[in-house]
Image (cartoon, helix red, strand yellow):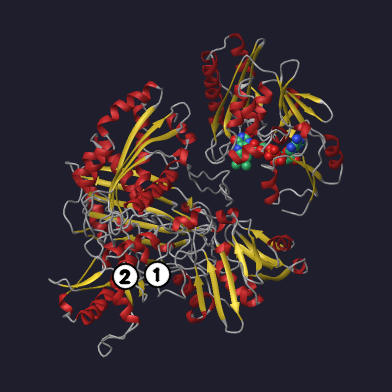
């Protein structure tokens, strides 16, 4: 690590102010950022810890019945607290990393980071959730802009994520054997007005919606409806752990299994 | 009733109390007064000309004590290689210079170029970033077969090629082997890769160098499996420090698996720099550094062929192997693909004719050396995969084909120069068939198929050779060291014993098992015996721990020293009892005059030895302390049969291990619980190699699997509950304990069973691909299923 200052604001407003300092960067659980700092791949001069901001903590339900999760809420808390209301989301949170990661890492950090193999982005996109920042509300469809890229501007903080609760949903994760992040994972959410399918781990462009599957499932919500669907592997990640074609194939299988689990 | 002490008892591992309560004393726990820290600037280029290393800006950075580059080590020796292989033409191997810090050229990613010693690690690292290194890239030599082609770029310009040696074994048999192939009724051919691995001990390497200006004494604290070997190699060959001025201490060591046998540059650097800076210098490897600087394991590419007659008897075997040495020769690297591999090619079978060819190749990768099993897993894997392939080509049962070709009589002289003293391969196979519940497999396969999964069953046998010896023979084979072991047994006045052994425990449990042996011999409780190891200052010259040699060789030295103790104690007892020495018997911790009730306790005798008031001073010296060196007359040959049952998800290619059974013959067993633990650990590493672990370079020599994000280590959830049995025991005939060694068996014996099982599962799904390379990842299985 290089040297840096640490600021520990207790309100969003103070955090925003602190982030106005030169080369400042927010830090939540540090589960992504600290390894990056240790490898000297980042050199912020100020780290603004978001952990002490009460208004970014915890889970509640809004008037529209949406599950609203504070940006600073750790995965373990989500796993515990939305179990009854949104079991697919709780199940996703419960399988991120290991207990240490789940008790430090936050939904805000995960969504802000937008790792192409992260779990939460799939849930956010498939649920048509809204990402709330200190400045605005951003629809999931407008938020994820590619690998590690989001609509967030410099100094903008994810303060909350609001999830509409689908009638049925399931997250099917096939792990990369080393990191145990998704090699490919699919979140299927069935709403009264249609089905959304989000895929993570697979694409060079990060999380995406598989529209062909959505269409097929919206008219016939059954595993058979997607069994024959193929997706192109040429723009998918190809690495030590699997080719683009393999990831494309897994996308189909994970989608089918997610649907089978809830139909 | 299980025994509650002595040989055969599952005594609890006493060392675990300190390990599990955080009271261990590991090298990184050692912090000396005035200590400085070193950070190594390592090459991020695989192959290049090192034009210049400009440290001028870095020199004035805060906290910098001194910066070293390759030029500072020109007068220092090369990191030595401990084994010289002679090739099939009678020429010695090509042996490049291995500098402490790169000089002239960089030859692998991770090679240290400069070393910054500073007041803190952070300052050392900051300064290292200010060093300006100018490298002209050269094409990287990665693929072994390309490396030995005419005109390939050379890793070492002063060598004639990238070929270290071309070894033929047994060269005189080659003609007869080829002839047998011409006359064969059936020939099975298999080409395979034994994947490169990173050992990944839980504790990364650490070195702390210290120098006492007042006395000229050097001390090195290091994470080593063999401190005496490091003292000799580093002192005599690199730094020119005589052994009496150099102490090497390897305290608690958190796992080695072979990778901590070798003498590394960082050890020589810290020892050298402590004197140059006149203060202690400490290096602690980060996990990232470990991936690119710890010696890697395996990495063989092999073509193997079996000739069979019309009755399915094996008539001849021949192999062609390319063995990766990496960029430099690590301490025992040349011996691994030759004497630890070629000599094992007979396996459990009476194949009369064998020829092994091994081409060792330099590449721009981290040096490759012994890793748990070292050569024997490579031999076992290719042979046991081949035998399975033979069975399928011939349409015969793989177990029956093995049984038909088993060696049945012992001692058995193989056509590859070694003589197996004992074994009973039928017994271990019988035991395996029982514990693996082969009879129930068909029903289990049905259950899997009902879930949409395929189920496969695979077996293999293995033979291994432990406690490599004797010294005069290994000397002829090219070892530049002896392979004996030593022990000093010191009895204290009040009867307790301290054993100073040259063996080194880095997880094996010597502190528990060794006392069990002495407790049995003398008839005293184990807690009266303490094991001291890991410090050249307090144990006799010993060769350390690797190759499952500790109990077979180190334990035997301890037995010999204890026998001397008992002989002398009997003399003292005969004096005290006023009886003739020949009538004295030692039993349950007391000396008795045979046929009488006259006896004297162990403690009375030991007290007399040190307070010799009533003592035959004219005949024997006071005191009770003996040393023995033991040089075995042969290797030991543990053997066994393993079975693996997998479930395969045909949609994803995911393989899970549902059952794993191991029937081993380790000869006599001192502590069954420790043996079981050793087998469990070995199996985890073997299964890891078979299913998950893969050290991979791209064509530019960049290490792709350079962290746990990409290097897949097995976890508990990836492994089944094993069924382990070691009730088949044919004791070793040539060591006093009748023990054979169990440390590596699990890693040696498991990969072929796993791959055989995966192929069986695929066949049951209608896909016969003949072979699939390790690691058998979901992506590879899926690709093979859809090929
Ligand atoms: C061993 C291990 C296993 C893991 N396995 C998985 C897995 O299976 N699936 C998975 O999805 N993830 C996994 N992760 C990642 C984990 O979920 C991280 O916690 C998460 O990606 C980042 O959250 P964080 O709170 O730790 O963010 P930090 O590391 O603190 O920050 C990450 C990035 O986001 C920025 N940031 C942080 N908070 C905010 C905010 N509120 N607003 C704006 N920007 C912000 C930071 O500046 C930084 O750039 C794993 C991590 C580890 C270490």
Kindly tell me whether mark 2's CB lies below 8 Å from ligand 1: no
Instruction: Locate residue A252: give its quadrant.
Output: top right
For disc 2, the marked residue is: B557
Q: Nearer the viewer, residue B441 or B526?
A: B526
Report the image quarter containing ligand 1.
top right
Q: Is residue B123 left or right of residue B579?
A: right
Judging from the image, what secondary structure is the residue with disc 1 in?
A: loop
Judging from the image, what secondary structure is the residue with disc 2 in?
A: helix
Q: Nearer the viewer, residue B120 or A257?
A: B120
Going from N to C along the chain, the mark reached first, 1 or 2, is: 1
Callouts 1 and 2 close, C-beta under 8 Å: yes
> Residue A9, image x and y in percent?
81, 41
For disc 1, the marked residue is: B502
Instruction: Locate residue A124: give its quadrant.
Output: top right
Chain at numbered mark 1: B
Residue B73 appears in view = no
Q: Residues within 10 Å of mark 2 (few under 14, many from 20)?
A: many
Q: Residues within 10 Å of mark 1 (few under 14, many from 20)?
A: many
Q: Is residue A212 above or below residue B306?
A: above
Chain at numbered mark 2: B
User: Are labels 1 and 2 assigned to the same chain?
Assistant: yes
Q: Is residue B292 above or below residue A34?
A: below
> Residue B463, image x and y in percent?
29, 52
Kindly tell me whether mark 1's CB lies below 8 Å from ligand 1: no
Q: Can you tell which mark lies on residue B325?
A: none
């Amino acid at each position: 690590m290089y040297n840096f200052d640490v600021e520990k604001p207790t309100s969003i407003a103070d955090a925003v102010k602190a982030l106005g300092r030169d080369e400042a960067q927010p830090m939540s659980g540090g589960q992504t950022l600290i390894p990056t700092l240790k490898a000297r791949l980042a050199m912020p001069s100020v780290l603004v810890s978001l952990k002490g901001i009460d208004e970014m903590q915890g889970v509640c339900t809004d008037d529209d019945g949406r599950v609203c999760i504070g940006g600073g809420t750790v995965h373990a808390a989500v796993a515990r607290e939305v179990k009854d209301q949104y079991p697919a989301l709780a199940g996703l949170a419960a399988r991120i990393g290991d207990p240490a990661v789940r008790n430090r890492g936050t939904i805000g950090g995960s969504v802000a980071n937008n790792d192409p193999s992260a779990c939460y982005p799939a849930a956010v996109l498939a649920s048509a959730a809204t990402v709330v920042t200190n400045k605005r509300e951003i629809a999931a469809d407008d938020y994820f802009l590619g690998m590690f890229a989001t609509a967030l501007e410099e100094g903008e903080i994810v303060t909350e994520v609001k999830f509409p609760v689908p009638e049925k949903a399931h997250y099917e994760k096939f792990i990369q054997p080393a990191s145990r992040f998704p090699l490919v994972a699919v979140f299927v959410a069935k709403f009264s007005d249609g089905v959304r399918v989000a895929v993570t781990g697979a694409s060079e462009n990060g999380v995406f919606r598989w529209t062909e599957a959505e269409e097929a499932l919206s008219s016939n919500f059954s595993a058979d409806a997607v069994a024959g669907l193929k997706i192109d592997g040429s723009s998918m990640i190809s690495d030590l752990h699997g080719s683009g074609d393999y990831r494309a194939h897994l996308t189909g299988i994970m989608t089918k299994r997610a649907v089978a689990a809830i139909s | 009733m299980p025994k509650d002490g002595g040989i055969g008892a599952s005594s609890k591992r006493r060392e675990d109390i300190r390990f599990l309560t955080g009271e261990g004393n590991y090298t990184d726990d050692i912090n000396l007064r005035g200590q400085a820290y070193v950070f190594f600037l390592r090459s991020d280029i695989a192959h290049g000309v090192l034009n210049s290393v400009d440290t001028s800006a870095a020199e004035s950075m805060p906290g910098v004590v001194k910066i070293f580059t390759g030029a500072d080590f020109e007068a220092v020796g090369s990191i030595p290689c401990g084994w010289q292989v002679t090739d099939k033409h009678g020429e010695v191997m090509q042996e490049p210079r291995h500098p402490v810090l790169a000089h002239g050229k960089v030859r692998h990613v991770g090679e240290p170029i400069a070393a910054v010693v500073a007041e803190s690690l952070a300052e050392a690292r900051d300064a290292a970033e200010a060093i300006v290194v100018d490298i002209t890239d050269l094409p990287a030599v990665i693929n072994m077969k390309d490396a030995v082609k005419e005109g390939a770029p050379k890793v070492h310009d002063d060598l004639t090629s990238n070929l270290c040696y071309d070894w033929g074994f047994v060269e005189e048999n080659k003609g007869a082997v080829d002839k047998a192939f011409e006359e064969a009724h059936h020939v099975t051919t298999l080409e395979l890769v034994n994947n490169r691995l990173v050992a990944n001990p839980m504790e990364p390497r650490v070195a702390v160098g210290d120098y006492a200006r007042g006395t000229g004494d050097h001390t090195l604290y290091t994470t080593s499996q063999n401190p005496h070997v490091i003292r000799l190699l580093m002192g005599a060959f690199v730094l020119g420090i005589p052994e009496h001025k150099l102490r090497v201490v390897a305290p608690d060591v958190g796992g080695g698996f072979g990778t901590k046998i070798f003498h590394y540059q960082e050890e020589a650097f810290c020892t050298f720099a402590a004197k140059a800076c006149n203060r202690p210098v400490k290096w602690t490897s980060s996990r990232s550094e470990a991936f690119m600087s710890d010696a890697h394991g395996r990495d063989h590419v092999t073509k193997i062929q079996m000739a069979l007659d019309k009755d399915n008897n094996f008539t001849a075997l021949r192999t062609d192997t390319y063995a990766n040495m990496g960029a430099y020769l690590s301490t025992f690297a040349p011996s691994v693909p030759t004497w630890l591999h070629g000599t094992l090619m007979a396996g459990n079978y009476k194949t009369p004719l064998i020829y092994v060819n091994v081409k060792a190749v330099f590449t721009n990768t981290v040096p490759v050396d012994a890793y748990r099993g070292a050569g024997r897993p490579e031999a076992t894997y290719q042979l046991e995969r081949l035998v399975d392939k033979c069975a399928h080509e011939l349409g015969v049962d793989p177990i029956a084909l093995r049984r038909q070709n088993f060696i049945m009589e012992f001692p058995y002289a193989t056509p590859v120069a070694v003589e197996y003293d004992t074994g009973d391969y039928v017994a271990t196979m019988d035991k395996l068939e029982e514990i693996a519940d082969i009879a129930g497999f068909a029903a289990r396969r049905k259950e899997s198929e009902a879930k949409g999964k395929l189920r496969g069953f695979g077996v293999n046998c293995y033979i291994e050779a432990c406690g490599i010896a004797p010294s005069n023979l290994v000397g002829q084979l090219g070892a530049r060291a002896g392979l004996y072991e030593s022990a000093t047994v010191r009895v204290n006045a009040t009867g307790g014993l301290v054993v100073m052994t040259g063996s080194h425990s880095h997880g094996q449990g010597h502190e528990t098992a060794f006392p069990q042996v002495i407790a049995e011999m003398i008839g005293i409780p184990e807690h009266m015996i303490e094991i001291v190891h890991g410090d050249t200052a307090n144990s006799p010259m010993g060769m350390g721990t690797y190759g499952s040699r500790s109990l077979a060789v180190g334990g035997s030295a301890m037995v010999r020293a204890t026998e001397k103790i008992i002989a002398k104690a009997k003399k003292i007892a005969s004096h005290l009892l006023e009886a003739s020495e020949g009538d004295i018997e030692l039993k349950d911790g007391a000396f008795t005059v045979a046929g009488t009730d006259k006896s004297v306790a162990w403690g009375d005798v030991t007290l007399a030895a040190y307070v010799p008031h009533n003592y035959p001073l004219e005949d024997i010296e006071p005191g009770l302390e003996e040393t023995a060196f033991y040089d075995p007359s042969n290797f030991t040959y543990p053997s066994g049969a393993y079975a693996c049952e997998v479930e395969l998800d045909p949609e994803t290619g995911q393989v899970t291990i549902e059952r794993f059974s191991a029937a081993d013959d380790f000869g006599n067993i001192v502590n069954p619980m420790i043996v079981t633990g050793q087998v469990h650990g070995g199996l985890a590493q073997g299964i890891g190699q078979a299913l998950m672990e893969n050290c991979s370079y791209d064509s530019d020599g960049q290490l792709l699997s350079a962290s746990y994000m990409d290097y897949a280590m097995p976890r508990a959830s990836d492994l089944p509950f094993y069924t382990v049995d070691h009730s088949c025991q044919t004791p070793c005939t040539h060591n006093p304990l009748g023990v054979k060694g169990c440390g590596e068996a699990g890693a040696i014996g498991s990969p072929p069973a796993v791959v055989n099982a995966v192929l069986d599962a695929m066949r049951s799904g209608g896909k016969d691909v003949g072979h699939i390379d390790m690691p058998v990842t979901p992506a590879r299985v899926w690709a093979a299923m859809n090929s």
